[in-house]
Image (cartoon, coloured by chain):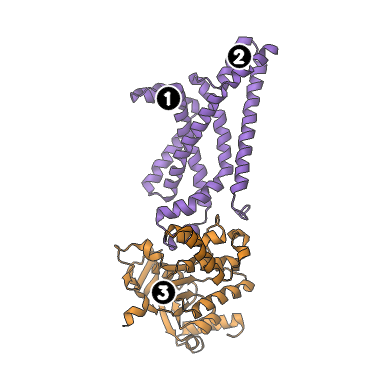
C-alpha cells in the first residue's frame, strides 16, 4: 500500500502570471518521514511551486493531494487542509504584535480551537524543540535576531502538528553566522522524521539530510536523485553550471 | 472681570455638550472609517470606487455646509427631520468617517503583506486573518495619526454653534453679549479648546506608548 505512505503528491502543476509561464508541469511525491530538497536558480519557480502546494497561489492546471485528499478540488475546505501544512517563510513573517510564545499559540487557539492551557503547553514544547529557551518566550519579533525569528517561525509551523512542513528558502534572509542555528534545527527535525520539503541553496544541508534532491530549472524539475549524485554528477548543463557556481561561492562542497 | 468670572460656570456647562458631539462624532466616524478602510484595502474595485466617492464628498465639503445641508435639506427631504444635536453628531461622524478611513487605510498598508499570508498559511480564513492578525496591528499603528483626528473633531464641534447647539462656544457668545465684553470670554473658550486638545492627545500618546509593538518603532 504505497498510497498510505504518500503524504504529498503533486501532479503536473502549471502556473502563469500573465504571459510569463512560471511552472510548466511539475510532478513529484513525498512519503512519510522523507525530506526532499528543491534547488535551482532564481526565477526557476521554486517559491511559486511551494505556494501552489498549499494553494496560497492557485495553480492553473494540475492537482495536489495531501494524504489522499485532493487540495485542488474546489469543494475542499482549504483552510482546514492548510492547517495541516506547515509553512516557513524566507522573511519569517512572524506576527509583529505577538510575543514568540503567542506567535506559536495563536494558530492552536484560533485555528485548532485548543483550550488555552493545552495550547500554552504545546507552544512551549514546540519552542524548546527549536531551542528557543524560556528567556525569549516573551520577546516580540523585533527584539529577536533573524535566526531566532526563523526558529520561532519553525516552531509556529511545528506546533500545529502538520503532516508536512514546507520551507521556502528559510536561510536566505539570514546573516551567514545565523544560518547554522536554523539549519541545525531543520536537520534535527528531519532526523526525527518530520516530513519536509525544503527549497534551499544550502547544498550541504541537502547532502547531509535529504532523501532526494530535485533540481528545478525554467519551471520544471529537470533532475532528481540522491543529493550527492545530483550535485557531483549532474546530467544537464543547467545543473552543472548551477552547482559549479554554488561550489565556487562556498569554496567546495 | 468679576462679572465674567461669575459666568465661567455657565460656559463650562457647555462642555458636556461639546463632549457629546466629540465622542459621538468620533465613535460614529470610527464605526464608519474602519470598515471603509477595510473595504478599500480588501474589497473589489466597484467597492473601492464607491468608498473613494464617499471620501471625496465628505472631505471636500466644509463642515458648516454639510450641517446646513443635512439639517435643513437632506433629513427633512427624507421625512425624518432631526434635532440640531443629533444632526450635528451624525454629520460630524459621517465626515470624520471619511478622514478616519484614510488613517486606517494607511495603517492597513503599513502592516507587511507577509503577515496576512502567514495567517492564511496556518489555516486562518480570510476574515479570521484580518481580524485576529491585521486589525490588532492596525489599531496600534493608527493611534498617533488618529490623535490628529481627535484634535480636529474637537474644534469642529464649535461649528455646531451654527445650528444653535448649546455647546461651549455658543454659551460663550451669550456671555459676551450679556456682559458686553468679548475679549475675556473668547480668550477663555479658546484656552479651553487648547487644554482639551493637549489633554486628549496626551492621553492618546500614553495609550500608544503602552500598546505599541515593542521594537518596531522607527521601522514603520
Q: Nearer the viewer, mark 2 or mark 1?
A: 2
Give neighbour class at mark 3: few <14, some 14-19, many 20+ (Cα, 10 Å).
many
Packing grade of label 2 (10 A; few <14, some 14-19, many >=20) is many
Residue under label 3: A219
Chain A rendering hue: orange
Placement of the N terminus of chain B among the 4 image quadrants: top right
Mark 1 neighbour density, 10 Å: few (under 14) some (14–19) many (20 or more): some
- Specify the quadrant of the image occupied by residue A80: bottom left
Q: Position of residue B187 (x, y in %)?
A: 66, 21
Closer to us: B46 or B43? B43
Residue furthest to the right? B1
Which residue bears the numbered disc 2?
B175
Question: Looking at the image, is B205 positioned above or below residue A127?
Answer: above
Chain B, colour shown:
purple
On screen, residue A110 above or below A29 = above
Q: Nearer the viewer, mark 1 or mark 3?
A: 1
Q: How far apart are the two marked residues, 3 and 2, measured between alpha carbons?
A: 80 Å
Q: Nearer the viewer, mark 3 or mark 2?
A: 2
Numbered tag placed on residue B112 in the rendering: none
Chain for disc number 2: B
Label 3: chain letter: A
Q: Chain of mark 1?
A: B
- Which residue, as the protein is rendered here, is positioned at the far front? A117
Q: Which mark is residue B69?
A: 1
Amino acid at each position: 500500500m504505497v498510497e498510505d505512505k504518500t503524504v504529498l503528491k503533486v501532479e503536473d502543476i502549471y502556473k502563469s502570471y500573465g504571459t510569463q509561464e512560471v511552472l510548466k508541469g511539475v510532478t513529484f511525491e513525498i512519503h512519510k518521514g522523507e525530506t526532499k530538497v528543491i534547488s535551482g536558480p532564481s526565477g526557476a519557480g521554486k517559491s511559486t511551486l511551494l505556494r501552489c502546494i498549499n494553494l496560497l497561489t492557485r495553480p492553473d492546471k494540475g492537482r495536489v493531494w495531501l494524504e489522499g485528499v485532493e487540495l485542488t478540488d474546489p469543494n475542499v475546505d482549504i483552510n482546514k487542509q492548510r492547517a495541516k501544512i506547515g509553512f516557513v517563510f524566507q522573511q519569517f513573517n512572524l506576527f509583529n504584535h505577538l510575543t514568540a510564545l503567542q506567535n506559536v499559540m495563536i494558530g492552536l487557539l484560533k485555528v485548532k480551537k485548543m483550550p488555552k492551557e493545552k495550547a500554552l503547553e504545546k507552544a512551549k514544547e514546540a519552542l524548546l524543540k527549536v531551542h528557543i529557551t524560556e528567556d525569549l518566550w516573551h520577546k516580540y519579533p523585533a527584539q529577536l535576531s533573524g535566526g531566532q525569528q526563523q526558529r520561532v517561525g519553525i516552531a509556529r509551523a511545528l506546533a500545529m502538528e502538520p503532516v508536512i512542513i514546507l520551507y521556502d528558502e528559510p536561510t536566505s534572509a539570514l546573516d551567514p553566522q545565523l544560518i547554522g542555528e536554523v539549519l541545525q534545527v531543520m536537520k534535527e527535525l528531519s532526523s526525527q522524521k518530520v516530513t519536509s520539503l525544503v527549497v534551499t541553496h544550502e547544498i550541504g544541508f541537502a547532502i547531509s539530510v535529504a532523501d532526494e534532491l530535485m533540481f528545478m530549472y525554467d519551471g520544471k524539475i529537470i533532475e532528481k536523485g540522491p543529493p550527492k549524485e545530483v550535485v557531483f554528477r549532474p546530467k544537464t548543463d543547467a545543473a552543472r553550471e548551477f552547482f559549479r557556481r554554488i561550489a565556487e561561492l562556498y569554496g567546495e562542497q | 472681570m468679576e462679572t465674567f468670572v461669575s459666568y465661567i460656570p455657565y460656559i463650562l456647562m457647555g462642555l458636556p455638550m461639546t463632549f457629546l458631539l466629540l465622542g459621538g462624532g468620533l465613535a460614529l466616524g470610527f464605526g464608519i472609517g474602519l470598515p471603509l478602510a477595510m473595504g478599500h484595502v480588501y474589497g473589489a474595485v466597484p467597492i473601492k470606487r464607491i468608498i473613494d466617492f464617499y471620501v471625496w464628498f465628505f472631505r471636500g465639503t466644509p463642515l458648516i455646509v454639510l450641517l446646513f445641508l443635512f439639517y435643513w435639506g437632506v433629513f427633512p427631504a427624507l421625512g425624518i427631520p432631526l434635532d440640531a444635536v443629533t444632526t450635528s453628531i451624525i454629520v460630524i461622524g459621517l465626515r470624520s468617517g471619511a478622514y478616519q478611513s484614510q488613517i486606517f487605510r494607511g495603517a492597513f498598508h503599513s502592516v507587511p503583506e507577509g503577515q496576512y499570508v502567514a495567517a492564511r498559511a496556518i489555516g486562518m480564513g480570510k476574515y479570521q486573518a484580518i481580524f485576529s492578525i491585521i486589525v490588532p496591528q492596525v489599531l496600534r499603528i493608527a493611534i498617533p495619526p488618529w490623535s490628529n483626528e481627535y484634535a480636529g473633531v474637537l474644534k469642529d464641534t464649535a461649528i455646531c454653534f451654527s445650528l444653535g447647539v448649546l455647546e461651549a462656544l455658543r454659551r460663550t457668545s451669550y456671555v459676551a453679549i450679556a456682559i458686553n465684553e468679548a475679549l475675556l470670554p473668547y480668550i477663555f473658550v479658546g484656552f479651553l479648546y487648547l487644554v482639551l486638545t493637549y489633554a486628549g492627545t496626551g492621553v492618546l500618546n500614553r495609550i500608544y506608548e503602552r500598546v505599541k509593538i515593542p521594537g518596531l518603532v522607527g521601522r514603520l
